[in-house]
Image (cartoon, grey):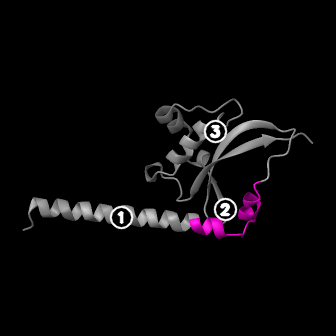
Amino acid sequence: MPKVAEVREFQETRLALRDATRRRRRRRRKAAAEESDASGLYTVMTRRRPLEVGGRALGFEILGFDLASFHSSLCHRLEKDFADKLGVHLNPEGFIADEDSARRCAEYTGLDATGAEPALWQPWQVVLYSS
């Protein structure tokens, strides 16, 4: 029969390996997303062009990119967690008002505990332009 210390050591090793595997997967997904040109997103983003003038900033939405598609934190109803755990509330337009709060929410969304898809979660500014 194994000793308690041996069982604990085995469990800690198993958890450390699991965490390392998850970190490797995240790094691979991030690298693949940066190299992927399937949607043209990488090409557009690397141009680093400023936003067009004349728009009205509505706020930030937390979006996750996983190689070819986007996911929204709103699909996971994380706005309640943002309010309860981070003190961040959506503005009247339904977005996060400031970039610092949006970055904290993006980091939170990327946690395994949220149940959100494994993706590169980032804050995206939404700007309204009149036609």
Q: Is residue 46 magenta?
A: yes
Q: Position of residue 9 (x, y in %)?
A: 19, 62
Magenta segment: 31-48
* Residue on which the image places disc 1: 18
Going from N to C along the chain, the mark reached first, 3 or 1, is 1
Q: Is residue 40 magenta?
A: yes
Residue at horizontal 89 percent and vertical 39 percent from the top = 130
Marks 3 & 1, CB-CB < 8 Å contact: no
Going from N to C along the chain, the mark reached first, 3 or 2, is 2
Q: Secondary structure at mark 2?
A: loop
Q: Judge the density around disc 3: few (<14), some (14-19), many (≥20) Cα neighbours within 10 Å.
A: some
Q: Position of residue 106 (x, y in %)?
A: 56, 46
* Amino acid at pointer 1: Arg
Q: Compared with residue 76, is residue 101 higher up or lower down, i.e. above or below?
A: above
Q: Position of residue 77 (x, y in %)?
A: 56, 43
Instruction: Please give the label number shown on residue 69.
Output: 2
Q: Position of residue 94 (x, y in %)?
A: 68, 35
Quadrant of the image containing the N terminus: bottom left
Q: Residue 50: in sight, yes or no?
A: yes
